[in-house]
Image (cartoon, rainbow, N blue to C red):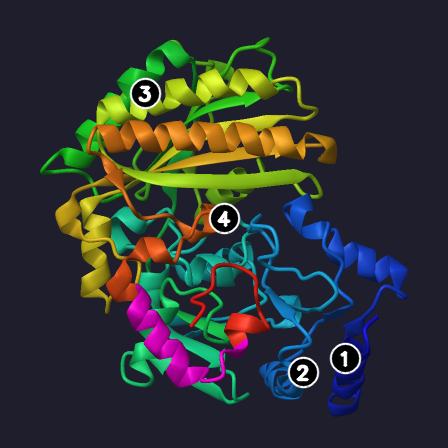
Amino acid sequence: MSTKISQAISALRQTLPHAHLVTPEAAEEYQSLNNSYLSGFESDLTPTCIFLPQSKKEVAAFVKTIQPFVGDVQFAIRAAGRQPLPGCANIQDGITVDLRSLKGIDIQDGHVQIAAGELWGSVYEYLEPHGLGVTGGKSTTCGIGGLATQGGLSFYSTREGFICDNVVNFEVVVASGEIINANAEENSDLWVALRGGGNNFGIVTRFDLRTFKQGPMYAGMVWYYKPSFPDQIAALVKELTSPDASVETHLMLSIAYAQVFSNGNDVICLNQLYYTQPIEDPPALAPFTHVQPQRAEMNTMKIQTLVQAATEQSGAGQSMIRCLYMNVSVKADIETLTTGGDIWCEELESVKDAAGLMCSYTLQPYAVSLLESTNAKGGNVLGLDPSSGPIVNVLLLTYWKEKKDDERIIGFMRRALKRIEQNADARGQLVPYIYWNYAFSDQDALRSYGKENVQKLQEVSKKYDPNGMFQTACPGGFKLCI
């Protein structure tokens, strides 16, 4: 342990004598915490100390205490640790600030106040008896922070916009150690910057989101075969470009491969479908639910609650394995999306023997109605505009077991992504936007927002963090590097 990190931890113990600080000497607790990330890429990192603040005041005390050590000591901010970007929520030989102990959910004036350590599943369970919904993660095990500051999608995004568009207030500890609120009336520049700007400005300790009336929905999964995938893409593009497209749908289409499937060496396709009203088999979903042939025994479409739908989605998640995402955005074009799937399948052949392999080529659409919600709700910094028409985010997701396969799995994903990007660019269908949560280390998500938005973010950073603490001492994620 370096002298400076030792001094920083001693200073924390002196400032917060009852603080929950976990070092490797507390082997069982330390390993339990450090092995609880979604991806082994995060657990590979070994912080010198894991700090679990019990309140926003302890977060503020941490920021003030660490200031004299900036330049010598680095830290990471962890909400739920479900974003697999290496180093995003953990730090080698530094201090990881784990927010899991910040708990609390309350409804005030049509908004739900959510402490940063909560998971979306707890939020949905709290809201369900009130007949309310909120734009939150599609999985119960996702944390609040990553999605609410980085442009994530919810079951309701077609109707309500991005998750970050629905945050009406951020309670945030800025670089001075002051606890402030950022909303439309107070620190509004920071409020907009946090809607996509990630961990560049401070540590958010509470998120206030608007709520809406919500009961059960029609949701589930439909499994089918690759020959039908082009027609499903055509149906997706038709729905997205229709002048009377439904705002009640959320659609995800995938080609998937997993060694555990009982379909030999072949890929299989999956539609994850949501209609946010309690209507059995609505016409808007019919092209996707009635696809034939399908694996009827695996069809889970039914009327279910928000909690049930998010629980089903989280069932596919795993922990303590290798996991990476990469992504690109393209226009809603049939040939571009179909060819992208073919490219992914071709590149997949090189890694099918990797132990525990589970991967997908997944399409998540951004409907025009979603993009229109941004301006109506105060704006964000993502750089997406309704005039660009409907967009489809192409996610390459891969899970595998063994570290020895890292290099070739990353190579497979990079080759596939590069070819998909080149194909889209050649067709004039490439969109520069990269979604932060699905980006790998060499994908510059922030710069994909465009020069104007990056400049806006840099100005906000200089105002609230004039010495660049969150640019240098907190290196995880994507940095503005002012």
Q: Are marks 3 and 2 in contact (CB under 8 Å)?
A: no
Direction from residue 73 to residue 199 in the image, left or right = left
Q: Quadrant of residue 63?
A: bottom right
Which marked residue is nearer to the observer: mark 3 or mark 1?
Answer: 1
| Residue 375 placement (x, y as % from top left) | 19, 63
Point out the tag, 4 or 3, that comes first from the N-terminus.
Answer: 4
State the separation of the CA atoms marked 2 and 1.
7 Å
The residue at the point 88 percent across, 65 percent down is: 26
Give the residue type that dot 1 points to: Lys
* SS for dot 4: helix
State the separation of the CA atoms marked 2 and 4.
43 Å
Picture quarter with the C terminus:
bottom left
Q: Are marks 2 and 1 in contact (CB under 8 Å)?
A: yes
Residue 12 visible? The answer is yes
State the separation of the CA atoms marked 3 and 2.
51 Å
* SS for dot 3: helix
Direction from residue 194 to residue 423 in the image, left or right = left
The residue at the point 81 percent across, 55 percent down is: 31
Point out the tag, 2 or 4, that comes first from the N-terminus.
Answer: 2
How many numbered badges does the structure rendering display? 4
Residue topped by disc 4: 307
Which marked residue is nearer to the observer: mark 2 or mark 4?
Answer: 2
Residue topped by disc 1: 4
Residue 110 visible? The answer is no
Residue range of the region highlighted in magenta in the rendering: 454-469
The magenta stretch spans residue 66: no
Point out the tag, 3 or 1, that comes first from the N-terminus.
Answer: 1
Give the residue type that dot 4 points to: Val
The residue at the point 18 percent across, 28 percent down is: 238
| Number of the label disc, if any, that sits on residue 69 | 2
- In the rendered view, tell whether residue 478 sits above or below residue 365: below
